[in-house]
Image (cartoon, helix red, strand yellow):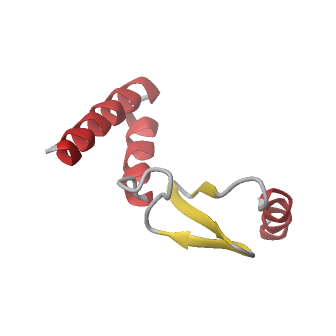
């Protein structure tokens, strides 16, 4: 996607979408809307324990070994994170 098209699309959704996850070259970047524009963040506001790096790792796994295996691994990771936060 051309960068100018990407920026134009952002303008259309800024008031509706508080958080974006963008995949570019197998890397997931998280953007949070803060008043007037989106700024890149290392973590998700909706899921504070999720980072772009973590999402990128599961994306890479999915591309290499398939979506089902990646989805199972991600669900397992989420359960582990939940347990860590409870304890």
User: Looking at the image, which residue is at 18% across and 46% down?
Assistant: 84
Residue 20 lies, in percent from the top left, at 63, 56
Task: Please give left or right for residue 19 compared with residue 78 in the image.
Answer: right
On screen, residue 77 above or below 52 = above
On screen, residue 72 above or below 24 = above
User: Looking at the image, which residue is at 20% across and 43% down?
Assistant: 86
Residue 80 lies, in percent from the top left, at 22, 39
Q: Residue furthest left?
A: 87
User: Looking at the image, which residue is at 59% across and 64% down?
Assistant: 31
On screen, residue 1 above or below 80 = below
Along the line of sight, the residue nearer the viewer: 62 or 75 = 75
Along the line of sight, the residue nearer the viewer: 18 or 71 = 18
Q: Residue furthest top?
A: 68
Q: Quadrant of residue 48?
A: bottom left
Along the line of sight, the residue nearer the viewer: 87 or 12 = 87
Q: Quadrant of residue 73?
A: top left
User: Looking at the image, which residue is at 13% across and 45% down?
Assistant: 87
Residue 5 lies, in percent from the top left, at 85, 63
């Amino acid at each position: 996607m051309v960068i100018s098209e990407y920026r134009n699309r952002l303008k259309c959704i800024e008031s509706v979408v508080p958080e974006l996850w963008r995949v570019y070259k197998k890397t997931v970047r998280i953007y949070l809307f803060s008043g007037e524009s989106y700024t890149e963040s290392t973590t998700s506001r909706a899921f504070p324990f999720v980072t772009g790096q973590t999402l990128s790792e599961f994306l890479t796994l999915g591309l290499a070994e398939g979506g089902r295996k990646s989805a199972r691994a991600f669900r397992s990771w989420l359960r582990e994170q939940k347990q860590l936060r409870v304890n």
